[in-house]
Image: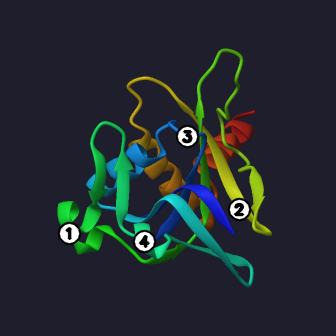
Amino acid sequence: MQVHGALVRIRGVGVLLLGPSGVGKSETALELVARGHALVADDVVELERAGESLIGRAPERIRHYLEIRGLGILYIPELYGPQAVLPESPIELLCRLERDAPGLEYERVGLERAREPLAGVSLPVVRLPVRPATSLGVIVEAAALDHLMRARGPSAAERIDRGLAERS
């Protein structure tokens, strides 16, 4: 199975960026690479189920390339070094980039992370609004780090919720 998106590895977390064409998936992936993370795939991500996990990789012909409108095609190892790319990665988090529009609502507290099936695997998903002058790379990086923290114990939202309940 293939999906249209970009796959990056952020501090050990495979994050699949999804969204409509032109929303900023590749630009976000480039920002993350510039911040020291690794590109796995841009534009086309091949998915392979491995038990209860999902592995993503780029098709061989476009592996390690990234397309940026206005610049063209970039070869990431030449620009950022061989450590800036990986041949494949497990996918642990989905980030859906959405053009912001009046009336759309987004998670504000984050007590529970929504889940979405992809190739038969249920994965946590965050919906992120794309707004002018937003640094999506920083936000996606924070989502990946929050995912790591949630695996280790209560989320920030759960801790603050407990604190408020104890004061009541």
What residue sits right under mark 4 in the picture? 61
In three-dimensional space, the C-alpha distance between marks 4 and 2, rounded to whole angstroms, equals 28 Å
User: Tags 4 and 3 in contact by the CB under 8 Å rule?
Assistant: no
What residue sits right under mark 2 in the picture? 123
Residue type, mark 2 in image:
Leu
Residue type, mark 1 in image:
Gly
In three-dimensional space, the C-alpha distance between marks 1 and 2, rounded to whole angstroms, equals 30 Å
Say how the picture is coloured.
Answer: rainbow
User: Tags 2 and 3 in contact by the CB under 8 Å rule?
Assistant: no
Q: Earlier in the sequence, mark 4 or mark 3?
A: 3
Q: Earlier in the sequence, mark 1 or mark 2?
A: 1
**Residue displayed at 55% across by 40% down:** 21
Q: Secondary structure at mark 4?
A: helix
Mark 4 or 2: the one toward you = 4
What residue sits right under mark 3 in the picture? 21
Q: Secondary structure at mark 1?
A: loop
Residues packed near mark 3 inside 10 Å, few (<14), some (14 to 19) or many (20 plus): few
Q: Quadrant of residue 120?
A: bottom right
In three-dimensional space, the C-alpha distance between marks 2 and 3, rounded to whole angstroms, equals 22 Å
**Residue displayed at 27% across by 42% down:** 71
User: Tags 1 and 2 in contact by the CB under 8 Å rule?
Assistant: no
